[in-house]
Image: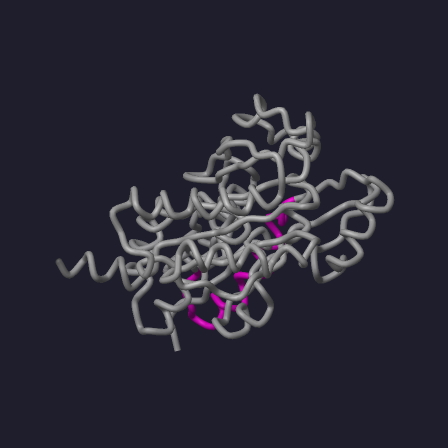
Amino acid sequence: MSAFEIFSDGAADIPKKEAQKYHITIIPFYVSLDQKTYQKEIEELSLDTFYQKIHKENIFPKTSLPSVQDYINAFTPALEAGKDILCFTITDTLSGSFQSANSAKEILKESYPHAAILIENSWAATGSQYLIVREAARMAQAGHCLEQVHDYVEKTKQYSRIFFVIGTLDYLEKGGRIGKVASVSGNILSIKPLIVLKNGEISKAGIVRSRKKAMLKLAELTKNYILQSHLHETDFVATIGITDDKTEIPPFQEIIEKALPSLPLLEPFQIGATIATHTGPMTLGICIVKKFEAYLKEQQK
């Protein structure tokens, strides 16, 4: 067993079976559909209900980050068992979850002064955060210590990317996350805005006029990124994320596999309410992270 336990906030959208397989504890965000009542994502508000509501009732939901007490409640049993803590949060440019977790850390250090409590700002979200957490958990299961995992995370988060297409800019605008993509006219002439998340920032990656062209362009962006990194496809791990229209997964996966035949591609996952609150429905993307084996290979050179 590892001498430390791994946690992540719910923004990582880690599939339940993956969280169980790698012993990752999820600390959920809260989502509100009426601007008043907040429910824990997945635990109290299912994704089916969430997507049905925003489709049928044209709702713009709100999110609330895990509280300091939520983090304290999650960390305490591990600390009581003599374990150290490794916790991942969504990039601090999109949420205050990182600050909330750090506040919990400072409170808990008073009672557990000898415990290591590392709060990792992932510089990522949804699938790219999921992949970083998964790689860290794989390292832990392979017997690597907390310091080695932390060193890997600090390096690999610079290589994480999400290339995605959204259905409309309305949700980014409503959530105040429009930022560097504000100049993309996503609501004119059926233009589909392409966006990239890297180093904790979202920015525009182009525009296309159909979902099929968007899929082709996302594959092209991913391939170009790998070429520019001077690494091989097999040095990465990737996954496809979708909000609500799962029928787009097979054609997109086929395009990715044709463009990047050697890229390890995990089972697709569903983007959760925390992220979809800001991107809206009809979001589709590919998330990619450098594997820990590639990091170790570089260390040995």
**Number of numbered discs:** 0
Residue sitting at x 50%, y 60%: 7
Residue 282 x %, y %: 68, 46
Quadrant occupied by the N terminus: bottom left
Please tell me which residue lies in front, 18 or 224: 224
Q: Name the image quarter holding residue 192.
A: top right
Asked if the magenta segment contains residue 93, the reply would be no
- Is 171 left, or right, of 53 in this rendering? left
- Is 11 left, or right, of 31 in this rendering? left
Asked if the magenta segment contains residue 75, the reply would be yes
Asked if 142 appears above or below 277 in the picture, the reply is below
Please tell me which residue lies in front, 104 or 267: 267
Asked if 195 appears above or below 29 in the picture, the reply is above
First to last magenta residue range:
65-85
Asked if 198 appears above or below 77 in the picture, the reply is above
Residue sitting at x 54%, y 47%: 215
Residue sitting at x 75%, y 60%: 46
Residue 257 x %, y %: 45, 60
Residue 280 x %, y %: 69, 41
> Does the image show residue 55?
yes
